[in-house]
Image (cartoon, rainbow, N blue to C red):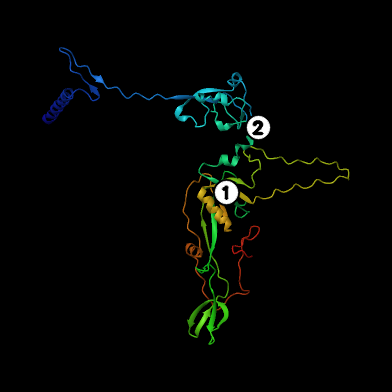
Amino acid sequence: MRGRLLILVGLVILIVVIIAVVFLSGGLPGQQTTPPPPGGTVVPQVTAGPTPTPIRFVNIVVALQNLPRGYRFPETMAELQNVVNYFPWPEDAVPFNALKEADGGLEKVLGKIARTDLFREQPLLSNLLVEQLTDIANFGSDAAAVLPSDRVAISVPINRQTSVAYGIRPGDRVDVIISMLFVDVDEVFQSISPNRITLFSIKDDGTIEFIQGVEGRPETTSLGPAVIGPSERQRPRLVTQRTIQDALVVWVGDFPLVGSYIGVPPTPTPVPKEQESTGSGTPPPPPTPVPAPDIVTLGVSPQYAVFLTYAIEAKLPLTLVLRSATDTSRVQTEPVTLDYVMNEFRITLPGRRDYTIEPAIRSIRQLLAGDEISLTGTP
């Protein structure tokens, strides 16, 4: 009991000391005191905070109502101010090509034509106005409008097998897989190995006699020197790898020549009128089948566009794989070679036996989708 009393007394003394130190040091933090006048009291003064910087506004031309593409603005100022007029806009957010009051913005709108659709409260920019109707067609394509700012559009060939059975649509995201064939070449000649060897000898009279060339490499065997030649042409080594990831599908097939396709309804196919069954009428022709697309336009980075151009020029097979609409990941894959297949799927090389089956198996069934793709250029 006595110990608790001593603790309480100590706490009271500590609080009194802290209060005394605060008042002796000039008051609470954030307050300033001035010496009191004779016989007066101390009045604390609170330091004022920083003064906020006011936002500066600039008057620019803004549309007062929705205006369609091709709209011709009035040629008188009184009528024009019922369609567009000045509106204060934060100076830091004013577009660089906005029409400002200080530069006579309304005068620049008189008699002009709207290049695109304009919406209410939209700032008028100098590049949205044209002098004559023929200039409206230069507003650009829908493809450029849907491209992200860091991507460019490039078209690559497709068929049923390389386009997910024509299942891709504009707005999808795809990855690009390529296949390549590698062969050994002579570093100097850049020709496929082995080299052709031509033997020659120098006769006594100084003339040179050439011996018909053979393909192969010279070696010393147990039977003596020999030229070891191939039994067939060098077999290329296949490697397959995923290259570009998350490419944007801009369009499948050929673009409309007018450049506009967003929101444009398809052209309806006319339905032939039913002919009266009089015996002399001919049946209507069957509908013309729509040809399958053979090209797709992708949105990729500028460097990947150069890569795709190289792949097309080199005639490398390109295969598109469809990504989930919610998948934005980047996963590094391993290049697939014969060694990868053997190791990944634990395939054991068959041993040699003193028996086999008949007839001899010299080929296996291949999965074909339309025409067979020959990677060597020959069927």
Q: Residue at x 59, y 18 (%)?
A: 78
Q: Which of labels 2 and 1 is toward the front?
A: 2
Q: Nearer the viewer, residue 18 or 46?
A: 46
Question: Could you tell me how far apart the alpha carbons at marks 2 and 1 are, in whole angstroms?
Answer: 31 Å
Residue 251 horizontal/vertical position (percent): 60, 45
Q: Nearer the viewer, residue 81 or 263?
A: 81
Let me know if residue 245 appears in the view: no
Label 1 crowd bin: few (<14), some (14–19), many (20+), radius 10 Å: some
Disc 2 residue type (three-letter): Leu
Residue assigned mark 1: 154
Q: Element at badge 2?
A: helix
Q: Element at badge 1?
A: strand
Residue 258 horizontal/vertical position (percent): 65, 40
Q: Residue at x 50, y 83 (%)?
A: 225
Residue 370 horizontal/vertical position (percent): 66, 58
Q: Quadrant of the N terminus?
A: top left
